[in-house]
Amino acid sequence: MSASTVDRRPGKPFLMGRGLVKTYGADRALAGVDLNIRTGEVLAIVGPSGSGKTTLLHVLAGILRPDEGEVTLDGHRIDQLGEAKRSALRRHEFGFIFQQGLLVGELTAAENTALPLLLAGADRTQALAGAREWLGRLGLGGLENRLPGQLSGGQAQRVAIARALAHRPKVIFADEPTGSLDTRTAAETTQALFAAAADTEAAVVIVTHDRELAAKAARIVEIRDGMIVGGVMIG
Ligand SMILES: Nc1ncnc2c1ncn2[C@@H]1O[C@H](COP(=O)(O)OP(=O)(O)O)[C@@H](O)[C@H]1O
Ligand SMILES: [Mg+2]
């Protein structure tokens, strides 16, 4: 199938996991998971600590290869690709937000945000202009030249959101992105993420153990002992 014939109507499954199994020694982190991600949707993955949430996110995002099962993006297997191809795919198609921002301490907010654009080959001046625009959209106008150490936790996570979205990925993977924030800042930061993702029509797959935040997603799946035990459609 050529790129121009790929069906991208809203709501169509485009990233699909089938029969995913991942084992660490005697530990079955994933015990046979089927999960589809639809274009532009916000999907929350909830479950207790150690249930396999991070492993599932990493397998869907091509960071980890499953022992069994397959992951397809627009109908093409990605789990069988070698590390270099998966790495390029992640850079171009996906954005990531982790619990602790993982901003580069020596770079300003604008430079951190511009990194994915620079890695994708953008011109430096253009990348920085794009980064400033994203920071403005996330309410960080005026903080572009701050280093991460000069930002609050909530501000730093907004930089991480801007960085994840700046290259307009198809999917944002967020692993407990507000886990180190207070409740109110966590709610505001999640709202900012969902709104910014909606602007770019990126799908969001967010891992959280915060039920209130999960309830703001359009769809929730619950995972226990490496298996999906429940799914809820909201709205
Ligand atoms: N790199 C690893 N090496 C060994 N065991 C791991 C590794 N990563 C995860 N696990 C195990 O797999 C299970 C699922 O872990 P994880 O996906 O991190 O769960 P969650 O994100 O829901 O807390 C846990 O039992 C964990 O100890
Ligand atoms: Mg985890």
Image (cartoon, grey):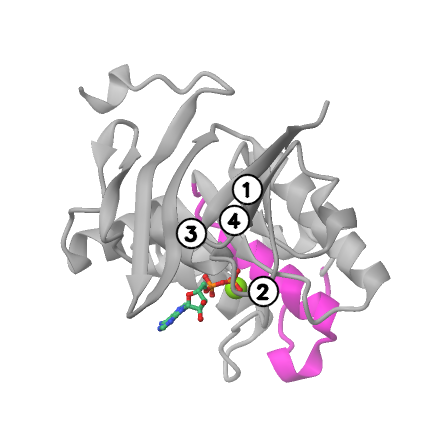
In the displayed structure, does residue 197 sit left or right of residue 24?
Answer: right
Tag 4: amino acid:
Leu
Residue 186 seen from this side: yes
CB within 8 Å, label 2 to label 3: no
Callout 1 amino acid: Val
Q: Which residues are magenta?
A: 141-169
Q: Residues within 10 Å of mark 3 (few under 14, many from 20)?
A: many
Going from the N terminus, do you reach mark 2 or mark 1 first? 2
The disc, 4 or 2, on the residue closer to the chain's N-terminal end is 2
Quadrant where the N terminus sits is: top left
* Residue for point 50% across, 19% down: 10
Q: Which residue is mark 2?
A: 49
Q: Closer to us: mark 4 or mark 2?
A: 2
Q: Label 2 vs label 3: CA separation?
A: 13 Å
Residue 85 picture location, percent across and down: 18, 52
Q: Residue at x 44, y 20 (%)?
A: 12
* Classed neighbour count for the residue bearing mark 4: other residues with Cα under 10 Å, few (<14), some (14–19), many (≥20): many
**What is the quadrant of the C terminus in the image?**
top right
- Image point (58%, 49%), residue name: 206
Compared to residue 37, the image places residue 98 above or below, namely below
Q: Which residue carries the number 1 mark?
A: 204
Task: Tell me what residue is drawn at x 50 percent, y 68 percent.
Answer: 112
The image shows residue 169 at horizontal and vertical percentages of 43, 43
